[in-house]
Image: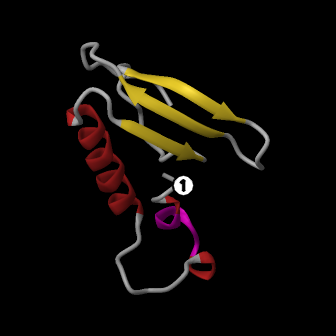
């Protein structure tokens, strides 16, 4: 995930196009949907983030690799078997 929902927060002049609804409410809905998806994913699921996704990772995701050589940090996470709880951004 490369900051997948950030365009919802951009001003009109910085948006790619007007093909889809872009607004703060959609941003919150999309982030919440990904948080649920990650929470419900099976153990062993991998996630790559570059600039994050704007939400909170469940605490059962463990950082496996990190690359700080790029302009922003690239992280690889793997979901463990631990109980679902919340990790802050």
At horizontal 51% and vertical 67% (from top left) the residue drawn is: 7
Q: Residues within 10 Å of mark 1 (few under 14, many from 20)?
A: few
Q: Is residue 40 left or right of residue 31?
A: left
Residue 47 position in % (x across, y down): 43, 40
At horizontal 47% and vertical 31% (from top left) the residue drawn is: 77
Is 11 located above or below residue 66 in the figure? below
The foreground one among 51 and 79 is 79
Q: Quadrant of residue 84?
A: top left
Residue farthest to the front?
Answer: 44
Q: Is residue 82 left or right of residue 64?
A: left
Residue farthest to the top?
Answer: 82
Residue 78 position in % (x across, y down): 41, 29
At horizontal 50% and vertical 43% (from top left) the residue drawn is: 48
Question: What's drawn in magenta, residue-wise?
Answer: 7-11
Is 9 located above or below residue 71 in the figure? below
Question: Quick one: SS at disc 1?
Answer: loop
Q: Quadrant of residue 20?
A: bottom left
Q: Is residue 42 left or right of residue 5?
A: left
Q: Main secondary structure of the magenta part?
A: helix
Is 70 located above or below residue 61 in the figure? below
Q: How is the image coloured?
A: secondary structure
Q: Quadrant of residue 38?
A: top left
Q: In the rendered image, which residue does mark 1 sit on?
A: 2
Residue 33 position in % (x across, y down): 26, 49
Indicate yes or no whether the magenta region holds residue 4.
no
What is the total number of numbered labels drawn onto the structure image?
1
At horizontal 55% and vertical 81% (from top left) the residue drawn is: 16
Indicate yes or no whether the magenta region holds residue 10.
yes
Residue 14 position in % (x across, y down): 62, 76
């Amino acid at each position: 995930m490369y900051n997948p929902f950030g365009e919802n927060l951009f001003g009109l002049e910085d948006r790619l196009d007007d093909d889809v609804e872009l607004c703060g409410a959609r941003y919150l809905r999309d982030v919440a949907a990904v948080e649920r998806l990650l929470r419900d994913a099976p153990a062993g699921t991998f996630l790559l983030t570059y600039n994050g996704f704007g939400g909170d990772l469940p605490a059962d995701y463990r950082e496996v690799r990190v690359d700080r050589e790029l302009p922003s940090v690239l992280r690889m996470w793997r979901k463990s078997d631990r109980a679902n709880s919340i990790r802050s951004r």
